[in-house]
Image: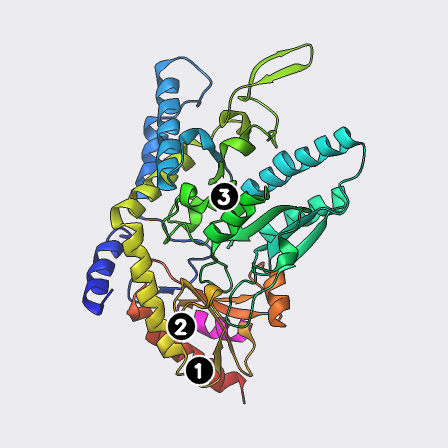
Amino acid sequence: MNNCSAEIFYDNAVRYFGYYPQHDYHYLDSAATTHKPDTVIDAISLGYRQFSAPVHRASYPASERASMEYERCREKVAEFICANSESIVFTKSTTESINMVAQGWLANQLINQEQASAQHTKGQCIWVSCMEHNANYLPWLRICEQHALTLKVIPMDIQGNLLWESPEIWQSNTVLIALSHCSNVFGGENPIAKVCAKAKALGIATLIDAAQSASHIGLNVNDIGCDFLVFSAHKMYGPEGIGALYINKLRSVQMQPLLMGGGIVSCVVNHEVSLVPAPQCFEAGSPNLSGALGFAAAVQLLNHLGVNNIRQYIAWLSRQFIEQLTQIEGVKLLPRAGGLSHSSVISFIVEGVHPHDVAHICGQHAVAIRAGHHCAHLALQQLEQTAVNRISLGVYNSTNDIAPLVAAICEAKEIFSK
Ligand SMILES: Cc1ncc(COP(=O)(O)O)c(C=O)c1O
C-alpha cells in the first residue's frame, strides 16, 4: 500500500467511527479491545428494539424472528472464516472458548482413555508456544495438573521465529498443540497452517487462538486445517461478551458441553439426557442475541472494508510507527513473531524508564498505550522482563498518532532517566 491509498483507506474507515475523536485522542490499545463502529452500536440497539424475545425457546412469531436473526448472525460469522454454521459455537469470549475445548473436549477424551485402558494418561504432553496469552496457557496447565500430563513450551529465536520444527514436539505422546496466530506481545504472525498440517498428519489436535488476527488477517479454517479456532468479537470492532469457537466435524462429535442447562436437550427421562445437535448443544442458557447482532455487524464492516485492505493498511501504518520509534535513542523494539518488519502490535522498552512511567506520561498527553505483562507471563519470562510497553493499531489510527506518541516518550525519558 502506498501513502496515497493508505490515506484513502483511512478516510473511508474512520467515517464508520463517527464518535471517535481523531485529533485529540490517540487510542493505541486495540489489541486489548477495539472501538465499535456506529453500525455495530446501531445493530445492538436495533436488536433490542426489534427482536426482544427469547431465542430458540418459543413458537410465537417474535421468538421465531429472534431465533432466525441469531442463526443469521451465526452464518455471517461462519462465512467470515469459511466454515459451516454448524461448526460455530457462540461463546462469551476467546477465554471461554478455550476453556470449553480444554474441559469439554480434552478432559473428556482423557477420562475416556483412562477408563478404557484403566491406566493413567501420564507421559502425554500438551504444547503451547512461549507467546501465549494466559487464556491459551492456564486452561492447559490446569488440565495437565488434573490428569498428570506435561505442559511443554515451544520457544522462539531472537528474531521472533517460533521453533516449531523441533523433533521433540512431534512425538507420539503429544496430544494437542495450542498456538496463537498473532501474539498479543510480539505481534507478527506464526506459521499456523504449517503447524496444523504437520499435526494433522500425525494425529495431533490443534487449537488456534485467532484473538489478535481476526481483525486484520483473512481466516480460512480449511486452509489453516486446525481442529479448533477461537476469537472474540470485541477485538474485531464488535461488542464485548461474545466470542466464537470453531470446531471441526471430527472433534465436534468427541466434545461434551462445558455448561449444562436450558436449551441443549431434546429430552430428559429418568435422568437420561439426550442432547440437541451441535452447535446448540454447546450453548446452554439464554443466547446472547444482541451480542450476536453486534458481532455480525462487525464482520459485515470487516468484509466491507476488505480484510486484505485492512491488513495492508495496518502493515503500512505499523511501518511508519516503527520508523519513528527506532529513531528515538534508548527505545528498543521487541522482535515480531515470524521476524516480520510490520505488525498490528509493536512492543518496546525505553532504556532507563519503567514501562508504567512511559504509559503514564503518554496518558497525560491523551496517548493510550499499555505497560505491563499483557497477561503473557511465558513471553515475559522468555524476554527476562517483568513489564514492556505495547502499542496496537486499529483502522481508526493514522500517522496523526505518531508525533504525540514520540513526544510523550521523549518527555518520559527526560523526566525519568535523569
Ligand atoms: C492472544 C490472545 N488470546 C486470548 C485473549 C483473551 O481474549 P478475551 O479476553 O476476549 O477472552 C487475548 C486478550 O487480550 C489475547 O490477546
96 lies above or below 313:
above
Q: Tag 3's secondary structure?
A: loop
Q: Amino acid at mark 3?
A: Cys
Taking the magenta stretch, the answer to whether it contains residue 357 is yes
| Identity of the residue drawn at 68% across and 37% down | 107
380 lies above or below 283:
below
Magenta part of the protein: which range?
A: 356-366
Residue position for label 1: 411
Image spot of residue 18 (x, y percent): 26, 52
Q: Quadrant of residue 52?
A: top left
Is residue 105 something that shows in the picture?
yes
Mark 1, residues whose alpha carbon is within 10 Å: few (<14), some, or many (≥20)? Answer: some
Residue position for label 3: 226
In the drawing, does residue 75 fall left or right of residue 104?
left
Residue 331 versus residue 354: which sits nearer the camera?
331
Image spot of residue 332 (x, y percent): 49, 78
Q: Is mark 2 within 8 Å of ligand 1?
A: no
| Identity of the residue drawn at 59% across and 41% down | 203
Residue position for label 2: 365
In the drawing, does residue 220 fall left or right of residue 337?
left
Q: Amino acid at mark 2?
A: His
